[in-house]
Amino acid sequence: MRTAEIRQRWLDYFESNGHTVVPSASLISPDPSLLFTVAGMVPFIPYMTGEQQPPWPRATSVQKCIRTPDIEEVGKTTRHGTFFQMNGNFSFGDYFKEGAITYAWDLVTGSEAEGKYGFNPDDVWVTVYLDDDEAASLWKEIAGLPDERIQRRDKKDNYWHTGQPGPGGPCSEIYIDRGPEFGKDGGPVVDEDRFLEIWNLVFMQYELTDVKAKDDFRIKGELRKKNIDTGMGLERVAYLKQGVANLYEIDEVIPVIRKAEELSGRTYGANRDDDVWMRVVADHVRSSLMLMGDGIVPGNEGRGYVLRRLFRRSLRAMRLLGVDESVMPYLLTTSRDAMSPSYPDLATDFDRISAIAYTEEDAFRRTLANGTVILDTAVANAKKAGAKSLPGTDVFQLHDTYGFPYDLTLEMAAEQGLSIDEAGFRSLMQEQKERARADAKAKKGGHADTAVYQDLLKTGATHFRGYDELQSPAQVVAVIKDGVTIPAASAGETVELVLDETPFYAESGGQDADTGTIRGQHGTLNVIDVQKPVKDLIVHTVTVEEGEVAVGDKVAAEVDAVNRRDASRAHSATHLIHAAIHETLGRSANQAGSYNKPGYMRLDFSWTQPVSADARAEIEGIANRAIRENLDVSTTVMSLDEAKALGAMALFGEKYGDRVRVVEIGGPFSRELCAGTHVGSSSEIGLLSVTGEGSVGSGARRIEALVGADAFKHLAAERSIVSELSSSLKTQPGELVGRIEGLVSRLAAAEKRLAGFEEQAALRAGETLATGAATINGVKAVVAVADGATGDTLRTLALDVRARLGEAEPVVVALFNASDRPSLVVATNGAARDKGFSAGDLVKTASQILGGGGGGKPDVAQGGGADVTKVPDAVAAIESALAGRG
């Protein structure tokens, strides 16, 4: 039974039993305390906590998940993986334990011919919480399980909660006995390798408080509505139904291992180390594919850093398998073919995904080249100091700063006869992890601070009237200061205000928040920010300018109309730029983020190379043509399915409800899901001027533009500059480019002639330098500062002096440039090299003193540093090296 079929059977079964099929949410978690969606229930947390009213009484999904805490263990065991899929069925105050157990038993043991999974009932074991007699009794009644196949476990194993105060309850887990060849008899309490957990039923029935640990909390009372949250591991069921040993051998994963075998010439199962690396490749390539499919691009922080780390670990693993060539065109396409039966978008969007992946692979190959140079320097320093291992600080710097994998450092150091200071490296890594944990804890705490807003939301959502009105009456629902509701605030205080309804737009969808004024019976308030800390609750940050404001006050809320109009122009301009990018670069150049405020917009989009000047001009021209054509702007609220059928574009990672707002500019010209404010027709934008385009990370570009009056001011300033230049150069504006190009060309020619004169002058110094050669330890040596010689001239001069001194005797020439960033070139003849004098070694000796590095061949090498004051010391070091070797 293929994985895609197991997935579909799940959805079909629960849909036929009254559940609404909910598509998988993005891997980008909606929870600000999480980087990724780590469990199937994460998208449903607001319904379980009561923060939001669930739109359906029961639901089902197959959720994409990523977990990375055990990333270092991936491949070493067959149980750890980063990407996985969680089948879930959920009840929100509908059915409870009896219903959940009935559905589970029926689907697990029902016949395959009826669309179920067909496991042998005699192989099924379950666990329940210690005192959950109700669940144990239901398993006997519904499934007929004997007492010995119903095992009881404590809170660490069979109790679930979020880790914070809120809902929780006991669990019941379903296990399949794989047979005596997999371990000891006696059920899951004896051996969880033989008895494999496939499904966890969570009975969410209590409100918990004083949550300190998994098994340390207090039950405050029963929930008003009891919920069901279940999770079945899709990959686990797949390898049981496919008769393979582990998740790496199922149909969605094993093809990548087979491709790694083909590329490396090695056989999976023949060598333990090779098996580890092949599993790393299979897991990480699949995880990277799924992350990029959800719009994440490699970067240096957050989700982008996790993706980059997964990607680089897979490439490192291929290198350890002996493959140095580019591999992603083979591995990624293989994974796409394996995963697209379940996720067709991976195939249709593969041009975008592969462009990001191949660019990242090329970049990492360059990282490996650069890291190798740095590693060579660290190895040389360690050997010079007589050390037998690389310092942990060097290994950590290579890993953390340059992205050089630890295992690769270990391997390459061993080739040079060195170990590494593992304890020092691990200590620095631990410090980094502790900093990360502290950061995560701070984020989690921030998330917990939304409690005051969640409590307010229970009294009712804020009605937003700002699409149609910029002024509206309202009533003060709450005044908040430092996370606590207060009855009133006085002049000079900055507080948060919640109104029953408001015309103020809260920052979202890339659009800046409105500003304006709130006038009440007893005071005037200046609105400086507007946010949505929880869905459907709009919170105004205000400064009380005069008087006071109190809960229950009747107020008049008034948006700054000029500011709003300019923000709407910028937001509509963002949509036009997005449409123009699609027309110019293609549909794979998808939006990856945006920001707009009065007079300014920027849009990030997936693209792997700089946008040419011609393409940039075309994008700007298309957007301005749409403005001139006075296209109609319309908004329609419809179902998500209707919006998709209409072709409306959605932003990667954005969570949408069943009803969405579609903004159209010129009908099909621009059609996007958007909750922002917009102009009535495109001509209201006035003018758009693209001011910049550049990279914002691997596989992502950013285009910036000014809008409306700001665009006009920008173009007027440029016109003034052109006028001044034309006047200074005594030419017409239309001839200005040619005139400047001519001046630049003549300047370059003059600089070239000047460099020629300097080189000739330097070379004339060659005779003087050769004449002044000293004899050191039987070697004719010229070790000196060559005034005025830089770059290639310094190298040419060193080779000239070496030639003048001939081949009869050993010759070493070391010439320095004593500029702000000093450099040197060392040249030796054959006789000197026979005596053991290598140009590369001498350059390294001097460069280290200069605070830099360098190297080259034994006959000629060059290097440099940053400290010009150390040049005399570097000269002395070379002379000392010549004197110390016979």
Image: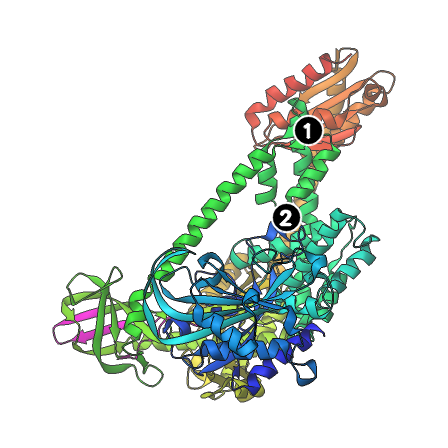
Answer with the quarter of the image where residue 564 lies.
Answer: bottom left
Q: Nearer the viewer, mark 2 or mark 1?
A: 1
Task: Pinpoint residue 614: horizontal percent, then vertical percent.
Answer: 63, 69
Residue identifier under label 2: 747
* Quadrant in which the N terminus appears: bottom right
538 left or right of 774 in image: left
Front residue of 475 and 65: 65
Give amino acid for label 1.
Ala
Looking at the image, residue 449 sits to the left or right of residue 802; the answer is left
Which residue corresponds to mark 1? 380
Answer with mark 2 or mark 1, whichever residue precedes in sequence: 1
Q: Secondary structure at mark 1?
A: helix
Looking at the image, residue 680 sits to the left or right of residue 232; the answer is: left
- The residue shown at (67%, 26%) is 388
**Residue 43 appears in the picture as rendered:** no
The stretch of residues the image draws in magenta is 501-525
Residue 310, percent from left and from top? 63, 55
Q: Position of residue 752 (x, y in %)?
A: 69, 43
Residue nearest the observer in this picture, 391 or 495: 391
Furthest residue in direction right, as rendered: 808
* Amino acid residing under circle 2: Leu
Residue 765 appears at what percent x and percent y?
A: 72, 24
* Circle 2 residues within 10 Å: few <14, some 14–19, many ≥20: few
Place residue 258 in its image quadrant.
bottom right
Judge whether 162 appears above or below 847 on screen.
Answer: below
Residue 5, placed above or below residue 695: below
Question: Could you tell me which quadrant the C terminus lies in?
Answer: top right
Q: Secondary structure at mark 2?
A: helix
Marks 2 and 1, how far apart at CA: 44 Å
